[in-house]
Every structure is written in structure tokens, then in C-alpha cells.
Amino acid sequence: MVRHRLQTLLCPRSVAVVGASPKRETFGWTSWRAAVDIGFEGDLFLVNPGYEDIDGLRCYPDLASIGRPVEHAMLNVANARLESVFDQAIAAGVPAVTIFASGYLEGDGDPPLLDRMKAKAREAGLLVCGGNGSGFVNRAEKVQVTLAGGRDGLDVGPVAMISQSGSVYLGMVQTDGRLGFNLTVSSGQEIATTAADYMDYALELDSTRAICLFVETVRDAEGFRAAADKAFERGVPVVALKTARTRASAAMALSHSGALAGDDRAYDAVFERHGVLRVDDMDEMIATLQMATQPRRFAPGGLVAIADSGGEREHLVDLAAGRGVPFARIGEATTARLAARLEYGLDPVNPLDAWGTGRDYVAIFTDCWEALMGDPDCAAGVWVADMRDVETYRGRFIDGAHAIAEKTGKPMAFASAVPNGVVHETARRLRGLGVPFIDGLGPAVTAMGRMMAWRDHRPASRMAAPDRPDEAVVARWRGRLADGGPFDEAEGLALARDFGVSAPEATVVNDAGEAAAAAEAIGGPCALKTATPGPRHKSDVGGVVLGLSGADAVREAYEAMAARLGPRCLVAAMAPEGVEMVFGMVRDAQFGPMVLVGAGGVFVEALRDAAVALPPFDAAFARGLLDRLRARPLLDGARGAPAADIDALCEALARFSVLAATLGDGIAELDLNPVIAGPGGAVAVDALVAPGPEPRRRTP
């Protein structure tokens, strides 16, 4: 038995079923029969004031009349009775309950029922599964608390599933032929117990080799991040399907970064930082879990593949390119082995089409597969084969392929090019051999790519982010941010410089004489910008003049700008030429500060070319963010332009991430735009800082 704070919820020694019924096919019947069918070894109490007994079992009128401690109460009642029964459970000292009802009442008061139950659960320390869920099945410990009933003789599988959707939950538990579960939880509204709590419990089960999440939101951000880190440390992949992706609550944000980030990118950043493998649909979910629970570890390198069709091979190549999944670069020895075995006219390449005339096809395919899987750059393999129980010739590949996977110690899967949607006997046989059969090439490629990402994941503990400034500097900026007053550009650039991001010295001026004096002090080409509060895009209002040479030119430009936009301006040294980038920080309501990097300049929002990450991180991680941008080739030089100093840009971004992690709690939004990336380094030439606990919003 697992010793965990959720023990009374997920592995109770006694269960009371409130709302039990003798009427077959009703939820009152199926819910208590589920506990019996799985072989529950604790005490089972039936509660319903309408019956004295049900099928020979005593039936109690209420929880209090049981007269003995009850560890878990199943509240199988309608919304109208839910609160009174909920209160009875608390009064009876029941430490855990499962709620199936939605908790929505017509004509409800303020606060509504769900909020009332949340408050009562917090005060009582009550553990709650649900509401608006389907319950849970703890196969590992023979506990089944479900609404729609269950099954007996359930094998203990390797996957723990937590779903905030009851319907998805019920659908997923039918995939046993491909997966197999040890714990399945329909967490619903998570009144008192969250997905993070269930993840933590699952990681204490010896049988858990992967965790499956279907979530609409993360209700305990800190707990979720801790559970995800714990999973990675224990070698347990977490595969997540996060819905509600199209919400963009930051779209009206003040800064470029706020407009580009959006809620869903925050989830991407959190999942990436903590090694959670995000998938886009249920097919990808199942396929990735299949690969996560097969017995062999992914090796370094890329994918190898074999097919009996040139068209299927081409389709596979297209899918892999679209998903960024690399193929192994097979060596000369492997190429020679393939060439010696293939029939005339077939190219010895990866991925391989090995079908010729069909003569001796099993031996040819098996020998070629051994060559591919044995290549030093092979991480894993996909054998494309549309196996069906009704056809026999592809089934002859199985034994040889399995033996090669065992010999090389590398994972492999068979995958159908034409999805069948059926868990057939061939798939069950392969699962028993530790070789998944994946329904569809798209899900197969995604699964391989996700597991390669998990193989390559570097947790925060393995990063060496740049050091933060000394505490006196940090304390000074904390105090300044706490004042809440607006920052001008000069002060924003000073903040960046104090955290190691290069930025030109800038002087705020209020008359033409001060402007000329600032230009003389710079002694070179100058930029003049309005420093009047208000304009978000200075260039749109004629508030930027570049390339001014000498005091007289600056004086003349100042007088014209001051007449239009006001006397407060800024004079700074001209930055060198290069590619315009943006560094940004926004604070997500759930996960805190987020760093954004993307193509910058005046068209930053139109281009929408950005990557988002959790701070802090190191220069190596920063390089990976840059590599995702569509603008990335520009940094290598385009149309004769010199290449940017990528190392300097990565170091600057890493230092900016330290700023975000250190001071982000006091900053609503922050932009350095543009950051000029050139051959001489990376220089921030404009800054927008919005202090405060909440991002300011644009007026619609």
C-alpha cells in the first residue's frame, strides 16, 4: 500500500456509497457494484434511507448511522442534495469523498455551490475527487470508485491517467489493447484535489512508467511543476493534451511581448521547461504513451524506417519534415549492407523502401532492418506495415523485428500508413513483445519526436544561467519598481545594463541646449527620440530621428520634435547595424514571468515570430529558442549582410532571463525592442518597462 496524503482518497480501507440502489442499470446500482467487481478488500457500506438492505447488504439511512469510521464516501446524489450530503460527510469525519454531480444549481446563491464546497473542503482538510467527473480506478490497489460501473479482472498496466474530462476518461480506459493502466482518475472540477496531487500519487506506484494528462487548465501551478520535475527525475514521461489553446487573453496587452505571448504559449513554455510532452490530439496521445512505456530507451541519433511502398515512404518523409523529426544519417557500412541485400533498382537509403519483386521478402526486410537498427546514429525505428488480422504476409515480420530490437536494445514500433482505428490481436501480440503497433504514420512520427525531445531534455538543475547582479543592485531596482512610477526609455535601458545586457548610454533632455550638449558628449552619430509619455510606437508619430551627426544637427531635430511632441526627449549613441530582435517579459497569471524572443522592430506584432520560455535559462537553451524562429537565417547573414554574433546574442538573452526571473514579480511587462544583433554583439536600443502587479491593457 502506498503511503501518501491521498491514501484515503485513492486507496481507502472503507468506502460508503451514498445513493446506492438495488435497481439494475442505474448509477446507484453500478457505482457500488464497481467496488465489488474489482475485488475491493476493505469495508463497503451502502447508504440510502429508502432501503434497509440491498442484495443482502445492510443499507444505512445516512453516514452518521454507520457508527464506524469511514475513509471514503462516494456521493452519488443529484445537485439538489449534494450540499447537505457533503456537509454530512464533513460532520461524520469522513476524510475523502468522490463527487459525480456538476455542482450547478438553478437559482443558486452567492457564492455558488461549487465555491461553497471549495471553502468547506479547505476548512475541513477534505480530499475531493471531482465534481463533474467519473471517479477513479486504482487497479494497482483494487479500488474502483466510478459512476458508470467497472470491470473485474483488470490487469495492472504501466500508465497513470488523469483527465479533467469525464468523457475522455471513459474513452481512454477502452484503449487497454494498446496501453494498459494502473491508475485512472477523472478529476473534473478539482474542488479540492488537483491533477498535480494525482501525479504525485501516481509517481509513488511502482507500476507507473508514464503519466497521461488531459487538462483544460492547471489549477496548482507550483504543484504541477514540482510533480513534473519529480516525474522526469524518476524516468517517467508525462504526456499532456492541453485544450482551450486558442484563448489569447494577452492580446490586448500594452507591450509587444504581451500581444505575442498569450496563455497557450505559457503552457508550451512550462511543459518544455519541465519535460512534459505536449500532443495535439488523442491519436498522438496514445502513440506517445505507447512509445513511453515500451521497454527500450531511445539512443542518441535519429529515426530509421523501412516500408514496402515508395509512396508510404514519401509520406513518412513529409510528415517527419513537418514535425521536425530527424532521420538517422546512416554510415557507409550500413549503406553497404543494405546495397548487398536489396534487389536491383532499390536505393540503400534511410528511410528505406525494401520491396522489390517479393522474392524472399521476409529475409530481405529482416536483414535490412538489422542493418538500420544497428547503425550508430539510429535512435529508434519505425517499420511501416499495414497489418490486419485478416492478412498474413506482413505478420511474418514480427518475430525477426522483435529479435533485432532485443539485440540492439533500441525501441521500435510497427505503424500503419492507413489507420484502422481497431485494436486487433496483432497489436495485442506486439504489445506483449514490447513493440507497439501505432495506428497511423502521423501519430507514430509525433511519438518518436516527443520521445527524442524527452531524451534530450535538460532540466533547470542542469543549466548554468548567468549570475545575477549583487544584492545592492537588485534591491535598488526592487525599490524602484515598487514605487510604481512610469519608466522612461533611459531608465529601462539602465535596468538592462545592470543585468548585463548591452545598451547605449542615453540622456534625457528638456531643451535644445541640453540636446546639443548630449550630442557633443557622445562625439559620434546620435539618435533622437521623444521621451514624452504616451506613444507606444515612437516611429509612428515621428518620434525617432536616426543618424544625426554633430550638435547642430541634433539641436535642429530637437526643436522640430519638441514643437510637435513636447520638450522631453532622449539622445543616445547610434547602435551598429544588424538584425532587429525583441526581448520581452510578460507575467502569466498562473506561472509567473515568461521570457519572449522574436523578430523585432516596428513590424514585431505583424510578423508574430516569437518563442516563449520560463526564466532563468542559460545560453545553450537560448540558442535553442533562436533556432525556432523563422527569422533565424537572417542572423547568419542574408543578401551580403555580415553574420550576427550568435554567441553574444544568446548570452544577452540568457542575462535578460535572469532579469525576468529576479524582478519579474514587480514587472507587469517589459520590452527591449529592438535588440540589434550584429557582428559586434547584441545591443538593446529601446526599452519599455511597465511596473506593477498586473499588465496594463490597451483600450479596445
Image (cartoon, rainbow, N blue to C red):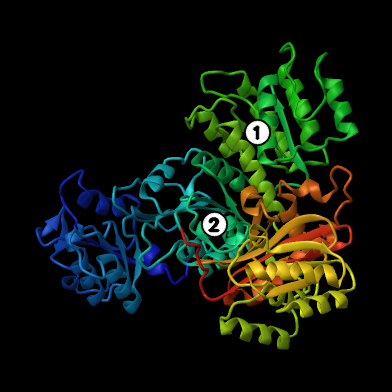
**Disc nearest the viewer among 1 and 2:** 2
Residues packed near mark 2 inside 10 Å, few (<14), some (14 to 19) or many (20 plus): many
Q: Is residue 92 above or below residue 614?
A: below
Q: Is residue 398 left or right of 357 when viewed as pictured?
A: left
Q: Residue sitting at 61 percent across and 36 percent down?
A: 444
Q: Is residue 548 above or below residue 521?
A: above
Can the viewer see residue 487 in this picture?
yes
| Residue placed most toward the observer, 508 or 285 | 508
Residue 11 percent across, percent down from the top left:
39, 64
- Residue 531 position by quadrant: bottom right
Label 2 sits on what residue type?
Gly
Residue 32 numbered tag: none
| Residue placed most toward the observer, 637 or 99 | 637
Residue 262 numbered tag: 2
Residue 319 numbered tag: 1
- Distance from Cα at disc 1 to Cα at disc 2: 27 Å
| Mark toward the start of the polypeptide (1 vs 2) | 2
| Residue placed most toward the observer, 646 or 559 | 559
Q: Is residue 462 left or right of 284 when viewed as pictured?
A: right
